[in-house]
Amino acid sequence: MNITVKLFATFRTGRFDIETRTYPEGTTVGDVVRELNLSEKELGIMLVNSRHVKLDHRLGEGDTLSLFPLLGGG
Amino acid sequence: MDRIARINMGAAGGPTVTFEEVGEYAGLGGRALTSLLIAREVHPLCHPLGNENKLVIAPGMLSGTTGSMTGRLSVGCKSPLTGTIKESNAGGQAAQVMARIGYAAVILEGKPEGDDLYKIIINKDGIKIEVDNSLKLMDNYPLVEKLRQEYGDKVAYITIGSGGERQLLAASIACTDPELRPTRHCGRGGVGAVMGSKRVKAIILDDAGMKMRAPKDPEKFRDANRKFVEGLRKHPVTGEGLPAYGTNVLTNVLNEAGGYPTYNFKQGQFAGAAKLSGEAQAELEIKRGGSATHGCHRGCVIQCSGIYNDKDGHYITKQPEYETVWSHGGNCGIDDLDTVARLDFMDDNIGLDTIEMGVTIGVAMDAGLIPFGDREGAIRLLDEVGKGTPLGRVLGCGAEITGKVFGVEKVPVVKGQAMPAYDPRPIQGIGVTYATTTQGADHTAGYAIATNILKVGGDVDPLKTEGQVELSRNLQIATAAIDSTGMCLFIAFAIMDQPETFQALLDMLGAFYGITMTGDDVVALGKKVLSAERDFNARAGFTKAHDRLPRFFYTEPIAPHNQVFSVPDEEMDQLFNW
């Protein structure tokens, strides 16, 4: 299935900003995080189609997954 | 910090100064001092620009010490924008310098007859008040340049631009940064108009001959400060994200989460967000020879600011904050950082709140004055404010007044103050804070974004109503206390997640004042401040009917989540239930 993966802030370094990638059925957010070698300790915000999810969330065809390190501001 | 100076600008025969012991306000600072004093001394029904209002300027409890992050200056008054009590705080050098000179507060009272404009010079020898009509209608950058020729670079300046002098309701009070740029503003609530009403153009603070404030227990204080700094450096938000990208790192976060209001709060996502993002901004700043990392005051270890240059490498402004990039950028349908930087400079120069002005321009666009996305049009409108034309005066009085003048129905304000960069429909927690805070719509008063969106300091679902009132209550209490310490609010990211860093803060306060400070004491302080503010507002005529969002947030869903704000009124009315 096709998943649009968006990376932000330091997660982009040595990776990419946005890519459409192909994954097998049943792939979870955690699988993508591990595949991209993103540190779970640094992981802050995980959004699928603009909604917060956890690592065990199963992705579906055409989903947009956005991954951010822990961030703050305001 | 054992004295309070009262300057009666309205005294017969010219302004007078009296000094008093700090008395019952001993050990207090910042927002605690300004709010308790205003609540006690200012008539709640007074006209905010009249002689009964007072402007209280107070460094925080730890300002002027060797403690890091202690550079926040609070100003308090009755707000001409909201009609409520107001505390607005800023970084820059002023708090540290005023605290070292020895003042817990400087209070401007009364108002002079006539047209004379004054400057106030505060140093170790006392306080001088002088007429200086050569400063009339000067804006902040040229004003500080002129003052530097007379008072030099080893001082801090607190100033108002033409906006404050004209008593515009969006007028700010500027504080200079370490390089003497007037970039750090007590922005919200029209505090600059109150200073303007007292005809005070500039306050020059000179701490030559003064020392750092000494803690009761220097060794313990040093040790606690060391642990506190370690905690800030090791937390990913205060140690990495904010230094590298600044507050504008939030543009992508809020846009992805669908909580980024655009086109005057009509959509929750903006197609041009990537061009405005903190990632793009930091890259551009570095490429152009500016900087993506800069501290607003000496002793800051977070360094969330930066320097924004034009394409030829010339300084335009300091790094615009997330809320500024949003208000002048996405909210107006403008996707160009150079335009935002120009507008940020103009706001700082004229002396205006960037949130209020961006939202006002968005309302003006909605009214059809100029189209959404019109870069030059937005600059032209702000230029009108700087010139003081009739249109400029309307715009300079903020979103609510502009909406009324031009017949706009949907104006995003609470208690007359413009809503910042987070839509309350997909982020219900921040809606509770906007509605209920004593200050009018204000994200900093109880930053539910941390827990709703960023997942720092806990996890509450932004799309649900459950738990939002309790969250906002706890955040509002904690914020009122932090705003009293002189600490930058961004320390909250680290102290919410790291108990040892919170303990280090308690130990700094305890060691400085020779007391034992507990978490319960912090909560008690926060509640005391909020209760005083609520009491003032009640006496000023505010009821629970004012603790609501504008109606369209309850009736018009916003994409992509297609939700309305739906926290029940009865729950919100229980927020201040202690």
Image (spheres, helix red, strand yellow):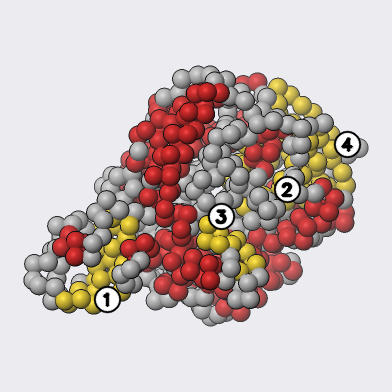
Q: Residue furthest left?
A: A25
The image quarter containing residue B405 is: bottom right
How far across and down, in percent of the image, does residue B91 sit?
A: 59, 47
Disc 2 on helix, strand or loop? strand
Q: CA distance from mark 2 to mark 3?
A: 19 Å
Tell me which chain the residue with mark 4 is part of: B
Q: Foreground: B315 or B63?
A: B315
Tell me which chain the residue with mark 2 is part of: B
- The first of marks 2 and 4 along the sequence is 4
Q: Is mark 4 in CB contact (under 8 Å) with mark 3?
A: no
Q: Quadrant of the C terminus of chain B?
A: top left
Q: Is residue B313 above or below residue B356?
A: below
Q: Foreground: B503 or B37?
A: B503
Q: Amino acid at mark 4?
A: Ala
Same chain for marks 3 and 1? no
Same chain for marks 4 and 1? no
Residue at 41% x, 60% y: name it: B250
Of marks 4 and 3, the one in the foreground:
3
The residue that disc 4 covers is B12
The residue that disc 1 covers is A19
Q: CA distance from mark 2 to mark 4?
A: 27 Å
Of marks 2 and 4, the one in the foreground:
2
Same chain for marks 2 and 4? yes
The residue that disc 3 covers is B294
